[in-house]
Image (cartoon, rainbow, N blue to C red):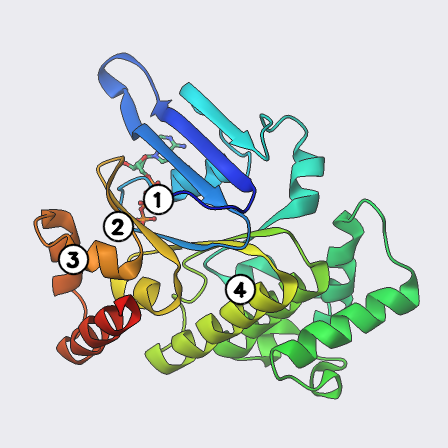
Amino acid sequence: MQSDKPIVFSAKRISKDFGAGKSLKTAVKDVSFDIYDEEFISIVGGSGCGKSVLAKIMLGLYQPTRGQFLYRDKPIKNLKDHWNEVQSVFQDPFGCFNQFFTIRSQLEDALNILKDKPSKEEVRRRVDEGLKAVNVAPADIEGKYPFELSGGQMQRMLLARIFALRPKVLIADEATSMVDACVRANILDYLRKLKDELKMTVVFVTHDIGLANYVSDRIFIMHDGKIVNQGTPAEVLDNTNEPHTLRLLDDIPEVHKTEWIKNSHRSKK
Ligand SMILES: Nc1ncnc2c1ncn2[C@@H]1O[C@H](COP(=O)(O)OP(=O)(O)OP(=O)(O)O)[C@@H](O)[C@H]1O
């Protein structure tokens, strides 16, 4: 795909190996793509297909073994600088918050990572704004600890933190997996809203092609380390000769599938 927006991530024939000899495992195989500013990209595939390794390459946690991977035209060298702009939300919100500190103190501390640290008042204001963006009144979490909130509420806290941090790029790895279908769709709505308000680029990593369709500008389908199908949701759906896409489609409930087919074709008109 060509776009007039600047390229955020550019991958040229990248591969990532783990181990050597008999235990050599190539988790990402000769993958190429460009991701543009303000796109919402979903990487979709079954377990072990290489989605998380690809996400970790974007975060600078892994270097590709072969090929060239650039963030805004440059290799990722300084992780602190990289994480100033590229943030992640991982699966387990409880794992991301310490049970022994209040939620507010942790939301505020998260801003310590920023190079130009905002003043105390500004930190408080940004955290309040983050909470309001996910429909939580700041007073409702005052003095509260993570164990006092449900899984769904904690997911919102992760999103509030993202809103307060205002990264340029967000890598969300199955951020919605701990909560039920209704809350998942809700959280994705918030994610989409944050993306639009903050003009973020979002890379969403998921097993669920239905969810990906719901929020994405483009979808990359992965299988066995390769991108086997990619495009807008409508293009991905039209490529019905691609067996791995069909298998992922089979996994989504019939009612969602019908909606998707309707919406995808509507969006093409
Ligand atoms: N640090 C590592 N050392 C060795 N092998 C690894 C490492 N990280 C990932 N792998 C292997 O690479 C392959 C891809 O892993 P990855 O975590 O990207 O899968 P995934 O698509 O995210 O799966 P899931 O949805 O189950 O998390 C797997 O076979 C995994 O075992």
Q: Report the residue marked by disc 1.
A: 51
Q: Residues within 10 Å of mark 4 (few under 14, many from 20)?
A: many
Marks 2/1 in contact by CB < 8 Å: the verdict is yes
Q: Amino acid at mark 1?
A: Lys
Residue at horizontal 75 percent and vertical 48 percent from the top: 113
The residue nearer to you, when weighing 235 against 81, is 235
| Amino acid type, mark 2 | Gly
Separation (CA) of disc 3 from disc 4: 35 Å
Relative height, residue 18 to residue 268 (above, below): above
Q: Of the numbered discs in the image, which one, if any, rests on residue 93?
A: 4
Residue 120, quarter of the rendered image: bottom right
Q: Residue at x 38, y 36 (%)?
A: 33
Question: Mark 3 = which residue?
Answer: 238
Labelled pair 2, 4 in contact (Cβ < 8 Å): no
Which of the two labelled residues, at mark 3 and mark 1, occupies the earlier sequence position?
Answer: 1
Badge count:
4
Pick the residue in front: 143 or 71.
71
Indicate the amino acid at tag 4.
Pro
Question: Mark 3 belongs to which amino acid?
Answer: Asp
Residue at horizontal 35 percent and vertical 44 percent from the top: 51
The answer to whether the residue bearing label 1 lies less than 8 angstroms from the nearest atom of ligand 1 is yes
